[in-house]
Amino acid sequence: MPKHSLRISELWQRIKAVFSTDFMRDVFIFVGALVIATGFWFLQRLNDTFEMEFNVPISLVGIPRGVTLTTPLPESVHVTLRDRGTQLINYMRHHMQPITLEFSLYDNGGATGCGYVPISDVQHALNTQILTSTVIQRITPDTLEFYYNRGLHRRLPVRLMGSVETTESYYLHGVTFSPDSVVVYAPALVLDTMTYAFTDEIHVSGIENDFVESIHLRPMRGVKYDPEKIHMTAHVDYYTEKTITIPIVGVNFPADKVLRTFPSQVDVTFRIGAMDYNKVTEKDFVLTVSYEDLINHTGVRYPLELKSLPEGVASPRLSPSEFEYLIEQTQEDTPLEAQDGTE
């Protein structure tokens, strides 16, 4: 006989010897008695009265063609029932049947409106499913309403509600949506006040790459969006430096005055996104100084300052940041005397 068969046989004999002792027999008897007693206790407890909460689906049926639910009923109501434990377990095993409500019973006949469902209607529907011994303790929510629309709508552009921030070396090049506009169904008084369809509030920070997110539009009572969810893309670009040379231009000088600057041109170094690097040129910058400012200036050197920046340009630096200047008087032209060609 193989050695491993002998070992298994020996192990089995030892196990039988252990479980055949008086001590183990007493343990089995005790455990069996405990299980039976627990079962009797549990059955006895099930005859006591308890409360239990059930989630019952609810829906609106018979919605006419051309009617859009802008704010539907909740998907379910929470019902607290009181009865014997055995009956509550029976409800739990077989589940509560969904409650269906007929739209026409709550339609006010308007182009847009709100339907109110009395809790008594829900309670009546529940009573058809439960025994007379079962008591309905609570139904939540205690107010049921829905909003509907018979075709009144507008198409509105989508706008971001929230913020998108990059790290220091990057910047937000723009935010786009797909689709970029949605159809909005709502009462006339609401539609007349809406200019955009705003997204749910979203806050994103520290991004360094294009960020794509599927996002819901901001819910409003009595308002439905089609579609209700859109894709947002935050386009991220990185900063690079660029240097260009621009002239200093005098403005508002009298006809007999001319400005001489030293130097006549300065370098402008600035941060610009890589996507826009070639779009920004010398023509996009204007560095001007006015005659009035210069004649009121007491020093020889005048500080330079850019009055405006092209879109996308950040952190400009001028080199040099000031200049020397002279205001020269030009020679006035002598008017020519009129000649008529006669002696």
Image (tube, helix red, strand yellow):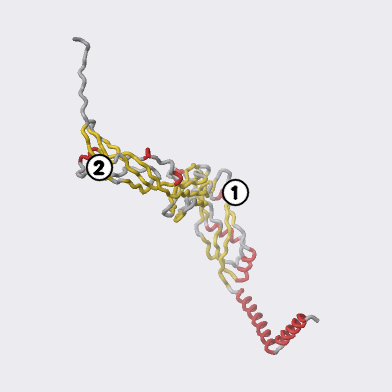
Along the line of sight, which residue is nearer the eye, 208 or 69? 208
Quick one: which residue is furthest to the bottom in this view? 22
Evaluate whether residue 110 shows in this view: no
At 43% from the left and 47% from the top, the residue drawn is 273
Instruction: Kindly identify which residue carries mark 2.
Output: 324
Q: Residue 305 lies in what quarter of the image?
A: top left
Determine which of the numbered discs, if any, sits on residue 187 in the image: none
Q: Foreground residue, 256 or 160? A: 256
Q: Position of residue 308 (x, y in %)?
A: 33, 43
Q: Quadrant of residue 264?
A: top left
The amino acid marked with disc number 1 is: Gly
- Label 1 Cα neighbours within 10 Å, binned few <14 / some 14-19 / many ≥20: few
How far apart, in angstroms, are the residues tagged by discs 1 and 2? 85 Å
Percent coordinates x, y for residue 64 in the rendering: 58, 45
Residue type, mark 2 in image = Glu
- Identified at 57% across, 52% down, the residue is 60
Where does label 1 land, which residue? Answer: 62
Q: Earlier in the sequence, mark 1 or mark 2?
A: 1
Element at label 2: strand
